[in-house]
Amino acid sequence: TTFDSPDAEETGIRNQPWINSLVQDTDNNYIISLRSFSQVWKINGNSGAVMWKLGKGGNVEMNTADEFMFQHYAHRNPAGDLMLFDNGSAERPLSRLMSFSIDEQQKKATTKIKTVLPSSLYSNIMGSSMLLPDQNLLTASSTNSRFVKTDAAGTVLWSIKVAEPFYRAEFVGNPFISQ
């Protein structure tokens, strides 16, 4: 559990926090997204030790203007950067698509992608974003029940509305052509 971390008491949370994504990183360790902390942690796959924490109050240095809120779907994108859907909150009712290059030795993050979605696509819960092969972004604006493709500037290239809210959008390449 997250309470196994020796510094868990510093969070002040007494209930087990909701982990909304867990992915195996390229080095066989794990990246987890802890929405209630507004942090993404990297966990050692053998020992379970917390290697670093990105986000407000974390131990990875980052630009405070790029701190995310209540994020979802933290994962490595094809460029090798850590990507996530920044939900925002009532305090900042805008969702952003973000990626960070992380120097794990120096514990420093450099923002690579910071795409602000139009206010009509604000999704205070759930959501996902991924970098597409054409360098555009595929997003799940979950509470709006929309799949959205944007460019890096946030211009909506297309949008599909579906009947019910959903959690994540995933790109699946054409399995019938070699890439």
Image (cartoon, helix red, strand yellow):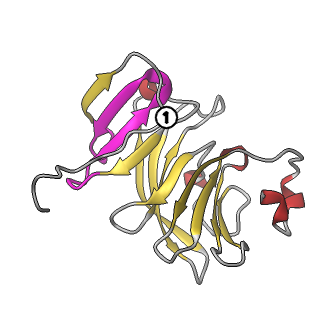
* Residue shown at 42% from the left, 23% from the top: 145
- For this orientation, the residue located farthest to the front is 176
* Residue shown at 27% from the left, 48% from the top: 172
Instruction: Say which quarter of the image contains residue 133.
Output: bottom left
Q: Nearer the viewer, residue 19 or 178?
A: 178
Instruction: Say which quarter of the image contains residue 8.
Output: bottom right
Expressed as whole percent of the image width and height from the top left, the position of residue 151 reads 27, 44
Q: Quadrant of the N terminus?
A: bottom right
Q: Is residue 71 left or right of residue 142?
A: right
Q: Is residue 154 left or right of residue 52?
A: left
Q: Which residue is mark 1?
A: 167
Does the magenta portion include 152?
Answer: yes
Does the magenta portion include 163?
Answer: no
- Judged from the image, the secondary structure of the residue bearing numbered disc 1 is loop
* Residue shown at 11% from the left, 61% from the top: 178
- For this orientation, the residue located farthest to the top is 163
Expressed as whole percent of the image width and height from the top left, the position of residue 19 reads 66, 49
- For this orientation, the residue located farthest to the left is 177
Above or below for 30 versus 120: below
Q: Is residue 122 left or right of residue 146?
A: right
Expressed as whole percent of the image width and height from the top left, the position of residue 26 reads 46, 73
Q: How many marks?
A: 1
Q: Residues within 10 Å of mark 1 (few under 14, many from 20)?
A: some
Above or below for 146 versus 22: above
Highlighted range, magenta: 132-155
Residue type beneath disc 1: Tyr
Instruction: Say which quarter of the image contains residue 76.
Output: bottom left
Q: Quadrant of the C terminus?
A: bottom left
Expressed as whole percent of the image width and height from the top left, the position of residue 142 reads 47, 29
